[in-house]
Amino acid sequence: MAKIIVVTSGKGGVGKTTSTAAIGAGLAMRGKKTVVIDFDVGLRNLDMIMGCERRVVFDFINVIQGDAKLKQALITDRRLENLAVLPTSQTRDKDALTQEGVGKVLDELRKDFDYIICDSPAGIERGAHLAMYYADEAVVVTNPEVSSVRDSDRVLGLLASKTRRAEKGDGGVPAHLLLSRYDPARVARGEMMKMEDILEILSIPLLGIIPESPAVLKASNLGTPVTFDTKSNAGRAYEDAVSRLIGEQVEMKMQALEKPGLFSRLLRRTA
Amino acid sequence: MLSLFRRTRPQGSTADAAKERLQILLQHERGDRATPDCLPQLQKEILAVIERYMRVGDDHVDIKLERGDELSTLEINIELPGARALTTRGAA
């Protein structure tokens, strides 16, 4: 049975698209048939982060409006054949998404994929609402920063009340916390909230901690999900998060806690 | 050490790759803005022309696009039903 996972946050710029690409690639690397869907209509970017921006022909909105078949809009990843991207429209606006249309596309995808990862736009408007509406689970991406934590709390409220699971009385969409841009050195100096404090405030289970890492920008420059960079801290942290997402018990290693020496830092950069 | 050497030369850096990808993409997107979404229409019209001569289902059309710097390629594959499919359909 396919699982629909929404990657959401409320706040913009915290790493939703990076995380969608990284989790999607990580699941595919584990042999799961995975599709990542861009819900940010009018501001599509998942295609760039996945590196397939030059191959977009039809999109999610074309499929919803009956102008193209789902099969035609799906772009198969060139690195992993069990990974696909469903890009959104760059020219329409979010009103082109309808609840019924999104539901139909997701039902069709359920037949062919093990995991359907919905990349939510920032905010809590229509696009964000429809990205979470049909979800079985949610990954809430949060930065250790007051506005991000506050917006995550707001989004948790919506996951618990404005989703199909909530309407059916299933208690809303279960959410996992993905703490990103975490800098253990700043936490140690007391300049950044620590993971335990954020968990205490949001009180949802922790899926992973992604350290602040130069590998993330490098991956986006190249259009390669950071999970493929298996030597980077961030790539390994996403790998661990993916293992937990599929139900494996993985110890919560703080990838960046050991402060690397100059030499190993240089070596890591070559990777 | 190779990395130190490589970083002294900006060519081939990931930043350059990012710039090049953006230049190619934005060039196309700015051009496309004048004629949004012509591809669904193109597909319909191509199918209509082909259907005048032979039988095809719109499930069997595959359109691929690759945007490049110097040139882009549009690849349209239309799968035609084989003889057996045609005779069974004819009998039905």
Image: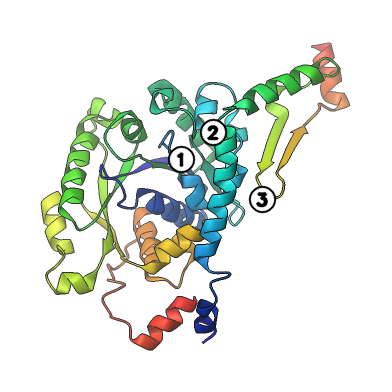
The quadrant of the rendering that contains the N terminus of chain A is: top left
Per the image, label 3 sits on a secondary structure element best described as loop
Q: From the viewer's perspective, is residue B34 above or below residue B67?
A: above
Q: Is residue A147 above or below residue A251?
A: above
Residue drawn at 30 percent across, 73 percent down: A256
Question: Three-letter amino acid code at disc 2?
Answer: Asp
Give the left or right position of residue A185, taking residue B89 as reference. left
Front-most of A9 and B16? B16
Residue positioned 19% across, 44% down in the render: A151
- Specify whether residue A203 is in view: no
Query: What's the chain of the residue with tag 3?
Result: B
The mark total stands at 3
Which picture quadrant has residue A9? top left
Camera-near label (1 vs 2) is 1
Identify the residue under disc 2.
Answer: A59
Q: Nearer the viewer, residue A252 or A16?
A: A16
Give the labeled residue for mark 1: A44
Near mark 2 (Cα within 10 A), the count class, few <14, some 14-19 or many ≥20, is many
Q: Chain of mark 2?
A: A
For mark 1, give the secondary structure.
loop
Give the residue number, with chain letter if any, for mark 3.
B69
Residue B72 image point, x, y percent: 70, 44
For marks 1 and 2, give the CA distance: 10 Å
Query: What amino acid is at disc 1?
Result: Arg
Q: Nearer the viewer, residue A106 or A233?
A: A233
